[in-house]
Image (cartoon, rainbow, N blue to C red):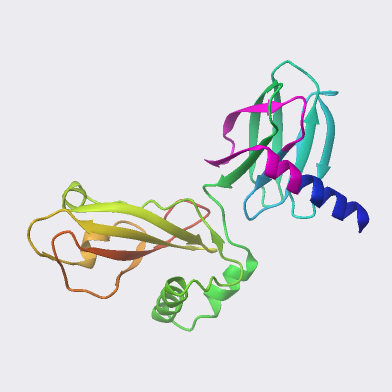
Amino acid sequence: MRKHLLISAVALLTAMTARAEQLTLNPGARVNAAVSNTNPNYLRVSDDRILSVQAAQGVLSAKSPTPEGAIVFSTITDKPFTMFVQTASGFAFSVQAMPGKRAGLSLTVDNREVQGTEEARTFEQKQDTYSALISTLVGRFLTNRKPDGYVFSKNTDVPVSDAVKSAFALRPVTAWQGDRVRIVRTDLTSLSSQRIRLSERYFWSPGVMAVAFHPQLDVLEPGAKVSVITVFRTKGGPDEP
């Protein structure tokens, strides 16, 4: 218990004094990072646990997991080296580390293709009908009540036509990923000098299960804003065609 508390304290101090960075990566990606060879460095993966960090023998002088699933590591080398990172969900990536005398690195990595857990699958399967799944999920999304097993996703992509892009300013807000469902909120601002009649078909594309506007509006005034909620059916990350 005392060891866990000590590691947590080290991780907290490292995160507070380090250079905080956050990146979104695809599985198998490689990222360059300036690490410290005079201070501890901190690495975490959102909604996941790091199981393994591998580097050439002797490169890492210290490596300690935290109770939250992050890693605090140190190095004294002054030569670039590569670390291979593997998580509990199977997400893997590599870090091309460039050491130097600087503040420790605090790096948070988001998996662009993050998947929900078995609990998310249970939630999706226990809904009696297609419409029940959509209405329940959208209702929870709007009130920020994330179902068990769902995770936040950095994949806020919503494919739209050039005509839609010319009519609205689109700002991605947030997204959840379940087992086979992704739900995204995008804020829209009208760029037109005329009233625009809102239509769900503006946001339909392969893989889309449902589209809803919040608040519910039929027409958007010039310069006015509205949110569009888009629900996608997914399989293993990419949206289904």
The structure residue drawn at horizontal position 84% and vertical position 48%, both measured from the top left corner, is 7
Q: Please report the bounds of the magenta region as a residue range.
A: 12-41
151 in the magenta segment: no
Image height of 42 relative to 165, above or below: above
**Where is residue 179, by image quadrant?**
bottom right
Q: Position of residue 51 (x, y in %)?
A: 76, 46
Instruction: Identify which residue is drawn at 62% across, 44% down.
Output: 108
From the top left corner, tell me how far across and down residue 93 is, in percent: 63, 36
**Can you say which quadrant of the picture contains the N terminus?**
bottom right
Q: Is residue 53 above or below residue 87?
A: above
Q: Is residue 149 above or below residue 111?
A: below
Query: Residue 175 vs residue 7: left or right?
Result: left
Res. 102 in view:
yes
Is residue 30 shown in magenta?
yes
On the question of residue 240 being in view, the answer is: no
- 168 left or right of 106 in image: left
Residue that protrudes farthest toward the right in the picture: 2
Q: Position of residue 142 (x, y in %)?
A: 42, 72
Point out the image quarter for the C terminus: bottom left
Residue extending furthest toward the front:
17
